[in-house]
Image (spheres, helix red, strand yellow):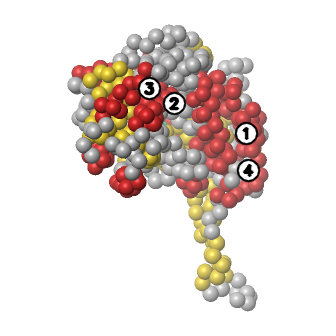
């Protein structure tokens, strides 16, 4: 690299890349203005990484990996313990930043960060989780051991909707297992990832083990076929997830790509309707509907449909829309004006295709000039409507009457997505059937939003996931390691 190619140190307060233990100004031609979704105020300017910035991050990561893999596993988890403490100390400040940058409510932001921290906690158990097994005397005079070893440099590309949590689905497991790690967070809300990396810096990882590169699709593409990257973790929309999976796999990399969703609630005639209505509205509208686990279609047994609709509308009418920093707020702002328009288009398409507009959230009256939509409820949603098939990612709930559990499961399984589904019932036999027959990868009974704890894997099926090993828990340990078998015979052994 000539001196003119050296990245510049980052000015105080600017957004940048964290490479080889230092902050740098990204040198790409593109960039974007980051705005507060609740009022449009400019928060920061984000310059994107250039190809040479990505190359520099990969080179630094590859060099760091050679040393880091040699650290004792017990040493590798010490910076993670420090990171956990720092995240907890900074949780309130991080939550406020998250609200300003992403638009959700303070309570949702605190909950998101807690989920992220739990992943750090699980990864601190890697000395136990990495054990792969040993059989003494597997054959006469022979002992066999399975060993887990890190891959090298791995990268994660993450979406806008959980900028504090989703990077932590990957970073702690990747480095605890001995890999070097590069994060490319969403360009839409980069402030929390930047603050996260300031804490990573304080936590004391050796230079180059953990890196941050900012950017958009070009930065992603620079990572996908980079010869210095061994594994790719992706979370985002399904078309991009599919493309990332195919491109990175064709380049010989290990890939896990979590995609979009279309999730259903099934309400049986035996269900506690108050509980089901409250959980259903919360699932559809929390985080302004911008969750891959949001259940945005409720399939309700026809005998209780009218009663359930009334209760849903009562809960929906209680939702307060506004700036997530103000109390009380239930539904914060959507990420961007473009995304708000996209959700409005979905509502319009539902009406034009014949759904009944039971509550219209298109004219909310929040404080401030942000990207707001109130809870919108559409009734009589049929399976062929666009709103029944596509991910809405806004505070919109569709309702439909179904004659039986069998019919409801049939509709759930017709979807090209299979991320999550919930059943509300008082009958164990319904629950058993639902568990056995429903296709989604995350199933809940009498639970509105099926978010697995970090010691379990997290990911869907069908077009909601491309790959084999999901995020979190034991799957993450397997994803980030290769297995080696070690067979020993000692001819002078006496047994
Ligand atoms: P997105 O697909 O637009 O972006 C995700 C990431 O991919 C970002 O880092 C972005 O920079 C990058 N990207 C975008 N377009 C690209 C392209 N053409 N080529 C290469 N990279 C590209 O997703 P989003 O809008 O940020 O997030 C919302 C989506 O993520 C929803 O579909 C949601 O369901 C999904 N999601 C899924 C899960 C899950 O666990 N399955 C979790 C959270 C979010």
Q: Tell me, yes or no, whether the two marked residues, 1 and 3, touch with CB atoms within 8 Å.
A: no
Residue 149 location, quadrant: bottom right
Quarter of the image with the C terminus is: bottom right
> In the image, is residue 125 above or below residue 262?
below
Q: Position of residue 30 (x, y in %)?
A: 52, 22
Q: Is ligand 1 closer than 8 angstroms to the Cβ of mark 2? A: yes
Mark in front: 4 vs 2: 2
From this viewpoint, is residue 56 visible? no
Q: Is residue 481 left or right of residue 77?
A: left
From this viewpoint, is residue 482 visible? yes
Q: Tell me, yes or no, whether the two marked residues, 4 and 2, touch with CB atoms within 8 Å.
A: no
- Number of residues whose C-alpha sits closer than 10 Å to that of mark 1, classed few (under 14), some (14–19) or many (20 or more): many
Q: CA distance from mark 1 to mark 4?
A: 12 Å
Report the residue at 43% width, 30% height from top: 281
Residue beneath label 2, please? 161
Q: Is residue 172 left or right of residue 386?
A: right
Q: CA distance from mark 4 to mark 3?
A: 48 Å
Q: Position of residue 400 (x, y in %)?
A: 29, 34
Residue 91 location, quadrant: top right
Q: Position of residue 105 (x, y in %)?
A: 57, 24
Q: CA distance from mark 2 to mark 3?
A: 24 Å
**N-terminal-most mark, 4 or 2:** 4
Q: Is ligand 1 closer than 8 angstroms to the Cβ of mark 1? A: no
Residue beneath label 1, please? 83
- Residue 76 is tagged as 4
**N-terminal-most mark, 1 or 2:** 1
Quarter of the image with the N terminus is: top right
Q: What kind of element bears circle 2?
A: loop
- Residue 315 is tagged as 3
Report the residue at 39% width, 18% height from top: 361
**N-terminal-most mark, 1 or 3:** 1
Q: Is residue 461 left or right of residue 183?
A: left
């Amino acid at each position: 690299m000539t001196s003119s190619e050296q990245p510049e140190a980052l000015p105080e307060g600017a957004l940048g890349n964290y490479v080889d233990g230092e902050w740098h100004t990204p040198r790409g031609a593109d960039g974007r203005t980051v705005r507060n979704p609740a009022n449009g105020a400019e928060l920061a300017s984000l310059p994107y990484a250039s190809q040479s910035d990505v190359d520099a991050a990969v080179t630094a990561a590859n060099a760091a990996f050679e040393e880091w893999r040699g650290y004792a596993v017990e040493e590798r988890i010490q910076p993670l313990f420090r990171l956990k403490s720092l995240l907890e100390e900074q949780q309130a400040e991080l939550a406020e930043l998250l609200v300003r940058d992403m638009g959700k409510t303070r309570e949702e932001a605190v909950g998101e960060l807690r989920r992220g921290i739990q992943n750090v906690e699980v990864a601190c158990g890697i000395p136990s989780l990495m054990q792969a097994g040993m059989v003494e005397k597997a054959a006469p005079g022979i002992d066999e051991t399975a060993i887990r070893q890190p891959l090298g440099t791995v990268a994660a590309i993450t979406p806008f909707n959980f900028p504090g949590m989703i990077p932590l689905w990957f970073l702690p497991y990747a480095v605890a297992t001995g890999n070097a790690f590069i994060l490319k967070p969403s360009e839409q809300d980069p402030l929390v990832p930047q603050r996260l990396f300031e804490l990573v810096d304080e936590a004391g990882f050796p230079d180059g083990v953990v890196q941050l590169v900012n950017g958009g699709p070009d930065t992603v593409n620079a990572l996908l076929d980079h010869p210095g990257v061994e594994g790719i973790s992706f979370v985002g929309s399904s078309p991009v997830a599919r493309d990332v999976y195919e491109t990175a796999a064709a380049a010989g990399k290990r890939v896990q790509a979590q995609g979009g969703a279309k999730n259903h609630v099934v309400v049986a005639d035996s269900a506690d309707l108050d509980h089901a209505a409250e959980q259903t509205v919360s699932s559809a509208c929390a985080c302004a509907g911008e969750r891959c686990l949001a259940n945005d279609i409720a399939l309700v047994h026809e005998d209780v449909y009218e009663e359930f609709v009334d209760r849903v509308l009562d809960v929906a009418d209680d939702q307060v829309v506004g700036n997530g920093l103000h109390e009380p707020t239930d539904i914060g702002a959507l990420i961007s004006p473009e995304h708000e328009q996209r959700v409005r288009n979905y509502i319009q398409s539902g009406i034009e295709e014949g759904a009944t507009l039971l509550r219209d959230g298109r004219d909310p009256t929040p404080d401030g000039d942000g990207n707001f939509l109130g809870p919108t409820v559409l009734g009589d949603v049929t399976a062929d409507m666009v709103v029944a098939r596509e991910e809405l990612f806004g505070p919109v709930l569709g309702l439909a009457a179904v004659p039986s559990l069998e019919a409801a499961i049939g509709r759930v399984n017709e979807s090209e997505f299979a991320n999550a589904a919930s059943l509300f019932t008082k009958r164990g036999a319904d629950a058993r059937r639902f568990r056995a027959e429903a296709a989604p990868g995350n199933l809940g009974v009498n639970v509105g939003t099926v978010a697995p704890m970090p010691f379990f894997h997290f990911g869907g099926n069908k077009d909601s996931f491309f790959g084999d090993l999901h995020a979190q828990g034991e799957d993450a340990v397997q994803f980030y390691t290769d297995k080696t078998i070690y067979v020993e015979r000692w001819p002078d052994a006496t047994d």
